[in-house]
Image (cartoon, rainbow, N blue to C red):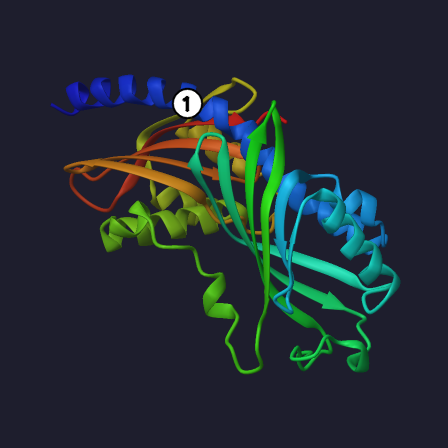
Amino acid sequence: MIRHLMCGMALTLLVASASFAQTASDETAVRSIIQDEIAAWNQGDAVAYSRHFAADGTFTNITGQFFSGYDAFLKQHQVIFEGRFKQTTLQQDIVSLKFVRPDVAVVEVLTAVAGVVSGQLAQGTNADASGRLRTRLLQVVAKQAGEWKVVAYHNVDVKPGIPLAASLAAPASAAAQLPADLRAAMQARDTAFYAADSAQWEKYTAPAFTTVQQDGSFMTRAERLANLRTQAPRPYVPRSREQNTQRGDIVLARFFSGGLWVLEVWTRETGPWMVLMSQVTTAKP
C-alpha cells in the first residue's frame, strides 16, 4: 500500500518540481533586492537604492507622506541621505515573503537604522534603547518585462513598547496544520543537521533512507551519516515557503532553506516520524 502511495506522490513531486524550478530563481531575485537596498543605503547611494523602484511605483514614508513615481522616490532618498540619514547603517530582516501570483511578491521586513542623531529624527518617531530607528517596511514587487520591480513601498515606524521578537515568528501556513509530533520531529532533525549532530539526525532518518543531493550524488542512510560526521556546525536556517501534503502516515514536505529547494518524504509505520527519502536542488540565480 505504501509503495502505491509513494508512486502517486512521486508523480505529484515531479509536477511540483517543475513549478518550483520556475520560482526558485524568482525568490532569489526578490531577496537580492532587499540585499541591494541594504548595500546602497549603507553607501548613502540614492541612485543605487532606487534602481529597483518601478517608474510608476508608489511610496509612503514613515511620516505618512505619499509619493508616486521613480523620480519622487529617488529625490526623497537623495534628501534623506544628505540629511537625517547621512552616514547611517541599515539592517533589514525578512519577516515574510509571499508570492501571491507567479509574477507578484509581497515582502515584509523589519528594519533597524543605526547612527541617527536623535535630534534629527522625524517628528513622531523615536529611537529604541540602542539608539536605532525601527520600522516595518512592506514592498510589493512585480515582474515587469522579465525584471522584478518595487511597485509599492510602505514604511511604518515601530512605536516604543511594541514587541519585535514575536513578530519575527514564521507566518501561519499549511505547515502549522501538521501533527505536533511531526512538526517537532522536523524541527529536531533540521536543528541536528545544522549542528552536525549525526546521532540526533539519525533518530529521525529511516533505515531505508536514500537521498539525492544538489550535485546529483545518490546516498544511502549510512553514506549520508558518514558525510554528516565530516561537516562542521553551521548557523541554523529555518524552512520557508513550506508546502506539505499528508496522506495518512505519509507526508510529502517541500521547503526552501539556505538557497536550496528540499523535498522530503516523511513516514511513520510503527514508531516516531522519520524521513524515508529526500531530494535537494540548488536554487539557480
How many labels sit on residues?
A: 1
Q: Which residue is pictured at 59% across the width and 28% down the height?
A: 144
Q: Nearer the viewer, residue 182 or 112?
A: 112
Disc 1 crowd rating (10 Å Cα; few below 14, some 14-19, many 20+) is few
> Is residue 178 something one can see in this rendering?
yes
Seen in the picture, residue 230 relative to 135 is either above or below; the reply is above
Q: Nearer the viewer, residue 167 or 154?
A: 154
Q: Quadrant of residue 99?
A: top left
Quarter of the figure with residue 284: top right
* Residue type, mark 1 in image: Ser
Q: State the image coordinates of residue 59 (x, y, percent, origin top left).
A: 63, 53
Residue 4 picture location, percent across and down: 16, 19
Residue where numbered disc 1 is placed: 19
Residue at the spot x=48%, y=31% of the render?
Answer: 261
User: Is 224 positioned to the left or the right of 44 in the image?
Assistant: left
Give the vertical position of 164 relative to 39 (above or below): below
Q: Nearer the viewer, residue 283 or 199?
A: 283
Which quadrant of the view contains residue 91?
bottom right
Q: Looking at the picture, how far across and down is residue 260, in whole percent?
A: 53, 33
Say which element carries label 1: helix
Give residue 108's position: percent from left, percent from top: 53, 53
* Position of the C terminus by quadrant: top right
User: Residue at 79% of width from left, 72% of height from top?
Assistant: 116
User: Could you tell me if residue 196 is visible in this image?
Assistant: no
Question: Would residue 135 appear left or right of 18 to someone viewing this image?
Answer: right
Q: Quadrant of the N terminus?
A: top left
Q: Residue furthest left?
A: 1
In-image side of 212 versus 45 (left or right): left
